[in-house]
Structure formats: C-alpha cells, structure tokens
Image (spheres, rainbow, N blue to C red):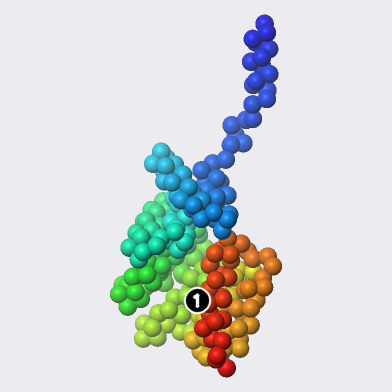
Amino acid sequence: MLARRVLVLVVLLTPPLAGAETPVETARALVARYHDDRTTLDRARDLLEDALRRESHIETMIMLSYVWFLWGDIRATTPEEKLAAYERGRELGKRAVELAPKSHDAHLWYAINTGRWGQTKGVLRSLFLLPTVREEIDILFQLDPRSVRAHSLAGNVYLEVPGLFGGDRAKAEEHFKKGLALDPKFTVLRVDLARAYIAAGRYAEARRELQRVLSEPAPTIIADWTVKDQPRATQLLESIKDQR
C-alpha cells in the first residue's frame, strides 16, 4: 500500500511530457544568447543535426539552416569553413522549400545562405546564383510583403552586385529604408543603409545611421547587435572619420 501511494505521488508531481521543449525551441533559446557564449551556436547546431537524423521535421530543417548561417558568420574562421557552413544551410533551406513551398522562412534561409555563399566565394565568381536569389526574393515578398529580412536581402543584392548585372544603389537604399520603416530597431539594416550612403559619398548621413546603431537601447536581435552590428558600425565610423 505504501509503495502504491509513493507511486501515485511521483506521478502527480512529475511534469507532463507535453511541456517539454522541442529541439527547435531549445535551439532558438541557445541562439538568442549567443552573444554571451558563442559556443551555444555549436550546441544548437549539434542538437538540431541529431534531431534531423532521427526525424525530418520541416521546422528543424529551417532552424538548422538559420543556425548554419550564423555559424558561418560567427564561428567559422576560414573561407573554407564559411563556404561549407553556408552550403549546408543552403542545402537544408532548399530541402525545406521543396517540402514546404509556402514557407516564408524556408525560402528566406535558402536565399540568405545562397547569397552569403556567393558573397564569400566572390560576387563575380558566383553570378550564376543571382537568378536563384532574385527569384527567391520575389517569392518572399509574395509570401510576406512586410518581410523585414527580405528587404535586407534585396537591399544587399542591389548594393553588392555590379551595375552591369543589375546592381542599383538607389534601389538598395529604398529596400533598407522600407525595412527600417517596418522595424526601426533591426540594426543590421541601419548598418547597411550607412554602407549605401558611404558608397554614394554621403558621409554625414552614414554617420547619423551608424551612431543610431551604437546608441540603440533595445535592438530587435540583441545577439546580432552585440556581436555583429556594433563592431561593424564602429569600424565604418572609423573608416570615414576624415571624410566630409
């Protein structure tokens, strides 16, 4: 009788399994604080790769594609490591798109990893990817006309690609501004807008945007702001300190 009472008590005090975090939820929590410990990206990657080996969930593929993008940006230390990370992210994104063609985030991370792979390889050496990235941008805006990250991606394509192949600083600036109108605290857009201003020789406007990045009290993604956007803003300000 005593044993039965103990068993009942244990059952009553045990939290329900339904409340357990999924691998995607755990990885999302790890990614949110990678500015405190960058090895959390390694843990998120390994957790999701293991989960994907066990079961091919779309959300796992999408989150892992995002994590590989971050890993390439933050953890990779050589061009070869970066290319491998973006290629894995691109592969996962493409698989997710094939399985869920209406998923905005599947298209997003497929396109972003593809674009970053091309940027790392060299724009002129990866122009064959440009039609794919442009097609994905069109799909992203069809799926979500208010996609901030799609504006960020489109702006970067227009800014980085040579004019002969469709680059356009005015269109880049337009996309960055549209994205900021939707989310003024998405600081990478402000850094990129400053880059567009610098390319056009508009240094006072660039300084204004970069100072806003540095003084932003509540960035949308604090990890990105801490690790990527603040340092880039500081470097860009230093690079134009003598420009008028």
At label 1, the amino acid type is Gly
Residue occupying image coordinates x 42% and y 82%: 167
Instruction: Tell me where residue 238 sits by quadrant.
Output: bottom right
Where residue 192 appears, as percent x and y from the top left, is 53, 76
* Residue found 49% across the figure and 65% down from its top: 140
Residue 54 sits in quarter: top left
Image quarter hosting the N terminus: top right
Nearer to us in this view, 65 or 243: 243
**Where residue 127 sits: x, y (%)?**
33, 75
Residue found at x 33% / y 63%: 80
Residue positioned 43% across, 46% down in the render = 46
Which of 139/42 is in front? Answer: 42
Across and down, in percent, residue 16 comes to 62, 30
Residue annotated with mark 1: 155
Vertical order, 43 against 78 (above or below): above
Does any portion of residue 161 appear in the rendered image? yes
